[in-house]
Image (cartoon, rainbow, N blue to C red):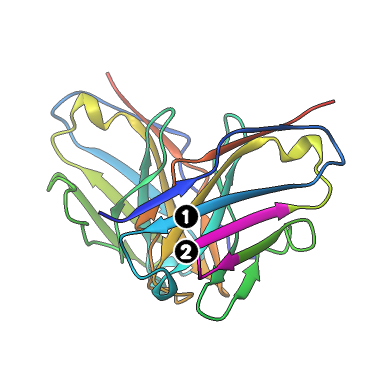
Amino acid sequence: EVQLVQSGAEVKEPGESLRISCKGSRYNFNSFWISWVRQMPGKGLEWMGTIDPSNTYTNYRPSFHGHVTIAADESTNTAYLQWTSLEASDTAMYYCARHESGASSSSFDYWGQGTLVAVSS
Amino acid sequence: SFELTQPPSVSVSPGQTAIITCSGDRLGDRFAFWYQQKPGHSPILVIYQDSNRPSGIPERFSGSNSANTATLTISGTQALDEADYYCQAWGAGTAVFGPGTKVTVL
């Protein structure tokens, strides 16, 4: 079965950089986009942005653009979400999820298990 | 910007029908998707493209979408259906989630 396996929990201080990962397996990684979704403590799901691993095209929700970077390495079937300077407000669970394309007909059919990021001084 | 609204909570007795609505401007012109999330777990897709069930999702889950409202219906609700449910659609190339509805099975 399709798997998206995310990297482990992180505890960071404000201002630090961070990269979390999402490794896909048991499917053609280049044939599906990967999105990242934030869930702050006790809150709902927020779509952050997406990447097409076949050409590294990215699209971000405006409120996240410039604060995070989404990348992918097709040689390792891995997508990444990275920050150069974390803020306390980045404390959240982060999920990766795959979808067939950027088209409005595509659903998030498989999700990673989530990576908890805690930012505190 | 495109937004989706959902009721914060829905309560249902076991065996009864739970109806969860999702509203957005001309939502019926787009596809609606529904996700179930239980505490401590990742979301799972329960309805795609308005009314289709992925493999493994029980038949008691159904969906519809028309005009400004998409609806997720859980027929014969079971205790294990207690969860948060999120609707989702695409707007201008960005995915939009509703705020979520907590379904409580009393």
Rendered image: mark on residue A23 = 1
Quadrant of the snapshot with the N terminus of chain A:
bottom left
Q: Is residue B12 visible?
A: yes
The residue positioned 31% from the left and 66% from the top of the image is: B49
**Residue A25 coordinates in the image, percent (x, y):** 36, 58
**In which quadrant of the rendered view does residue B92 lie?**
bottom right
Q: Is residue A107 left or right of residue A58?
A: left
**Residue B20 coordinates in the image, percent (x, y):** 34, 44
Mark 1 in CB contact with mark 2 (< 8 angstroms):
yes
The residue that label 2 is drawn on is A77
Above or below for B11 versus A115? above
Q: Is residue B4 visible?
A: no
**Which amino acid does the dot numbered 1 rest on?**
Lys
For disc 1, the neighbor class at 10 Å (few under 14, some 14 to 19, many from 20) is many
- Cα distance in 3D space between marks 1 and 2: 6 Å
Instruction: Please state which of residues B79 and A87 is positioned toward the viewer in this rendering.
Output: A87
Q: Is residue A27 left or right of residue A59?
A: left
Q: Is residue A92 magenta?
A: no
Q: Chain of mark 2?
A: A
Where disc 2 sits, the SS reads: loop
Q: Chain of mark 1?
A: A
For disc 2, the neighbor class at 10 Å (few under 14, some 14 to 19, many from 20) is some
Of the residues under marks 1 and 2, which one precedes in the sequence? 1
**In which quadrant of the rendered view does residue B104 lie?**
top left
The residue positioned 22% from the left and 62% from the top of the image is: B52
Q: Is residue A75 magenta?
A: yes
The residue positioned 57% from the left and 29% from the top of the image is: A42
Where disc 1 sits, the SS reads: strand
Instruction: Please state which of residues B103 and B56 is positioned toward the viewer in this rendering.
Output: B56
Q: Main secondary structure of the magenta part?
A: strand
Q: What are the residue bounds of the magenta stretch? A: A72-82
